[in-house]
Image (tube, grey):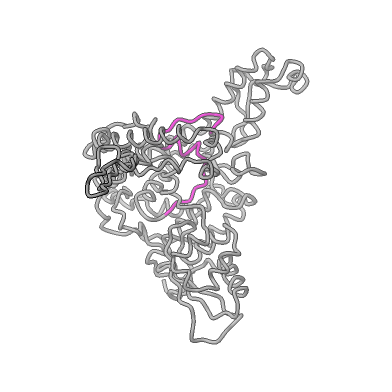
């Protein structure tokens, strides 16, 4: 028989007709471990290979700390509805919980609160769908040579922005707080392209605007003035990032960008913006620091200032002499003075720490006004409480989608039904897969559904190109003789066949 007391199981056995009765064993079982779903074995060295910072900490300490965190989360779940009351979603800020944001990932109540806050703050579906006439050929010419169109009037971004303005004083502007099931915000008519937009054209316009705001290629000129490339474009993991342009003063458009980000967070579509954590943290109200966040913007400057702090006077005089003055270049290349008349004041060795402090402050705050405008637009669409409950990484993923497009991630999207495509995707790099997604769905990030209709009846061909319907996220695939041919045709179509001309005659409009 087994007798249970709160923290141990006593195993008894009776022999010789009940004459020999003794305890044969004692099994200790932690009720906390059972309730919280923890196992001390998880913290043994073989399981910590992916977490080198934890390897030096004794497993028992890690286990006890994990127990404390889970108990804290259990208490927090009971208090969370009172810290962030769903019925007061629009009142003030709840950033008193920002110091425990990372712990909120373990909360069982958080997701329900977020959904409730979004639902309580949503508006009704618009009574009409705006119809926009967009000339993508003019937009492409502008993207190739932005200097020919200084006002950017031909960019898809500007065409959509101007097209959504109310035509008369009685027409309401879009509030972007519609239900998530409202998955097409406007209807696109691409001039000289045959399209009946049932969602595909709309998603294409979002993807075009994303590409104009933060181009995926570092080689092309910037089509729009709202963001500028960071200094880390030559090497490093953070070389593809952009930051708001400190010189751009078009705050109404920055606010609209924030509204689009909010609509993407609420819905299922994406506005892909390659922004560093420094920007996302400020948008969500999290604190930023020089050493943690600015290396993603200018790692060379971070290392230079760190070296300056620790160098001796002889080295400082040798490296800088009389040339270092109280000024610094911003991300847009503009030179600003750190003190009045700083352009003619030489930095002395004794004052180098103050110079470092001023540079750090200037660079951390260089895009402060632009980020504030984006945040203002974002918070017109998304309640503050939601931003307080989400980490900046989660906000980025909800707005921009998942940047990691692995073959395994594509397989659940009906792609595993055709082995040639699966083999092709394994060969593709990340950018190829993003272009493939864009070609089929109009989106360049996951999640995005894909449906494949292979031609099983026709004869094998090496000439025909695949076709797609972005409205239904469907790929129509000819019968190719090999995975190699399939890969080549898909890649060519993804990069070269972006116009929509199969829905109708482009001259019927």
Residue at 28% x, 49% y: name it. Answer: 172
Q: Position of residue 498 (x, y in %)?
A: 53, 66
Along the line of sight, the residue nearer the viewer: 158 or 447 = 447
Q: Is residue 90 visible?
A: no
Vertical comparison of 421 with 127: above or below: below
For residue 354, what is the image quadrant? top right
Q: Position of residue 90 (x, y in %)?
A: 27, 37
The extreme top residue here reads 350
Q: Is residue 153 visible?
A: yes
Along the line of sight, the residue nearer the viewer: 109 or 399 = 109
244 is within the stretch colored magenta: no
Residue at 47% x, 69% y: name it. Answer: 415
Along the line of sight, the residue nearer the viewer: 363 or 42 = 42
Q: Position of residue 449 (x, y in %)?
A: 42, 64
- The answer to whether residue 267 is left or right of residue 91 is right
Q: Position of residue 130 (x, y in %)?
A: 34, 58
- The answer to whether residue 112 is left or right of residue 453 is left
279 is within the stretch colored magenta: yes
Vertical comparison of 215 with 356: above or below: below
* Total number of numbered discs in the rendering: 0
Magenta region, residue range = 270-292
Name the quarter where the C terminus is drawn: bottom left
For residue 463, what is the image quadrant? bottom right
Residue at 59% x, 25% y: name it. Answer: 359
Along the line of sight, the residue nearer the viewer: 149 or 96 = 96
């Amino acid at each position: 028989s087994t007798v249970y007391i709160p923290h141990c199981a006593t195993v008894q056995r009776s022999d010789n007709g009940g004459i020999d009765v003794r305890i044969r064993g004692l099994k200790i079982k932690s009720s906390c471990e059972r309730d919280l779903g923890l196992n001390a074995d998880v913290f043994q060295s073989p399981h910590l290979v992916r977490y080198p910072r934890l390897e030096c900490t004794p497993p028992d300490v890690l286990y006890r700390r994990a127990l404390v965190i889970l108990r804290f989360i259990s208490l927090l779940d009971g208090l969370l509805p009172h810290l962030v009351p769903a019925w007061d979603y629009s009142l003030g800020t709840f950033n008193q919980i920002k110091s425990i944001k990372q712990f909120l990932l373990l909360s069982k109540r958080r997701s329900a609160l977020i959904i409730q806050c979004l639902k309580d703050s949503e508006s009704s579906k618009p009574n009409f769908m705006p119809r926009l006439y967009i000339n993508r050929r003019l937009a492409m010419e502008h993207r190739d040579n932005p200097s020919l169109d200084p006002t950017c009037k031909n960019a898809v971004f500007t065409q959509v922005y101007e097209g959504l303005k109310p035509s008369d004083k009685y027409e309401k502007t879009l509030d972007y707080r519609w239900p998530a099931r409202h998955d097409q915000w406007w209807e696109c008519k691409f001039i000289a392209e045959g399209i009946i937009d049932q969602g595909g054209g709309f998603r294409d316009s979002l993807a075009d605007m994303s590409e104009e705001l933060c181009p995926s290629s570092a080689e092309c000129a910037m089509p729009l003035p709202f963001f500028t490339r960071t200094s880390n474009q030559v090497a490093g993991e953070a070389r593809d990032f952009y930051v708001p342009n400190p010189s751009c003063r078009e705050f109404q458009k920055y606010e609209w960008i924030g509204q689009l980000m909010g609509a993407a967070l609420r819905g299922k579509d994406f506005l892909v913006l390659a922004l560093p954590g420094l920007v996302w943290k400020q948008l969500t109200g999290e604190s930023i620091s020089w050493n943690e966040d600015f290396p993603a913007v200018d790692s060379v400057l971070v290392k230079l200032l760190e070296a300056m702090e620790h160098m001796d006077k002889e080295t400082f005089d040798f490296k800088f002499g009389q040339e270092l003055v109280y000024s610094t270049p911003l991300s847009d290349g503009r030179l600003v003075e750190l003190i009045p008349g700083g352009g003619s004041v030489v930095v002395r060795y004794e004052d180098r720490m103050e110079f470092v402090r001023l540079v750090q402050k200037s660079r951390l705050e260089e895009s402060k006004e632009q980020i504030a405008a984006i945040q203002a637009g974002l918070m017109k669409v998304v309640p503050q409480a939601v931003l307080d409950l989400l980490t900046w990484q989660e906000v980025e993923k909800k707005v921009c989608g998942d940047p990691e497009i692995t073959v395994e991630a594509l397989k659940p999207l009906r792609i595993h039904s055709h082995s040639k495509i699966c083999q092709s995707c394994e060969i593709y790099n990340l950018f190829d897969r993003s272009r493939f997604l864009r070609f089929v769905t109009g989106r360049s990030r996951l999640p995005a559904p894909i449906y494949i209709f292979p031609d099983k009846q026709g004869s094998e061909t090496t000439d025909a190109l695949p076709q797609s319907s972005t409205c239904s996220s469907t790929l129509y695939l000819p019968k190719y003789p090999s995975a190699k041919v399939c890969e080549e045709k898909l890649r060519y179509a993804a990069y070269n066949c972006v116009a929509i001309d199969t829905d109708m005659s482009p001259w019927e409009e």
